[in-house]
Amino acid sequence: MNFNKEETKNLLNMLRSSDKENSIIALSCLDNFSKKEHLGELLVLYQFGMTPAEIWEKNCKKGFKHIKKVLPFKSSDYRLPSSKVFNELVNNNCSKQSIELYLELFTNEFSNHLYAMGYPTDKFDIQIKIKE
């Protein structure tokens, strides 16, 4: 199975759901299809899915194993420094679509932080593009 951007976003929504059963289902699906070539999608889902490491380790053993090979973290971490995750996406030659999705989610989050600090985010647009 190859994850496209839409499938990854759907899994992300399941991980972020207030219904914890949705995140367990998403992790079970990921565990069935986790391969090294899905590392980019796994990193994006881990970074933005708001699901603790313990739950990943219990319900997505194969996927979590791939994540742990490239990211050092404490057992309760589910958010890591953005620069570290981005560097691992690039250094591990992850798919362009996973890098694009990471940047899209990071930019949305950054805009939300700016808005919370009082910046008029309706007056500007932040765009990040990958250099070829």
Image (spheres, grey):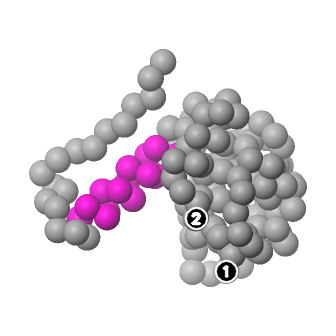
Q: Is residue 96 above or below residue 56?
A: above
Look at the image and give the residue range highlighted in magenta.
102-115
Where in the figure is residue 115, as x and y percent of width and height?
A: 23, 65
Q: Main secondary structure of the magenta part?
A: helix
Does the rendering let one see residue 63? no
**In the rendered view of the protein, which quadrant contains the N terminus?**
top right
Question: As rendered, which of 115 and 28 lies closer to the eye?
Answer: 115
Residue sitting at x 74%, y 47%? 70
Q: Which residue is mark 1?
A: 20
Q: Earlier in the sequence, mark 1 or mark 2?
A: 1
**Residue type at mark 1?**
Lys
Residue sitting at x 84%, y 55%? 65
Does the rendering let one see residue 57? yes
In the picture, the disc for residue 79 is: 2
Please indicate whether residue 36 sits to the left or right of residue 115 in the image.
right
Where in the figure is residue 33, as x and y percent of width and height?
A: 83, 49
Where in the figure is residue 59, as x and y percent of width and height?
A: 83, 69
Q: Quadrant of residue 25?
A: bottom right
Residue sitting at x 83%, y 43%? 35
Magenta region includes residue 105? yes
Where in the figure is residue 113, as x and y percent of width and height?
A: 31, 64
Kind of element beneath mark 2: loop
Kind of element beneath mark 1: helix
Q: Is residue 87 above or below residue 93?
A: below
In the picture, the disc for residue 76 is: none
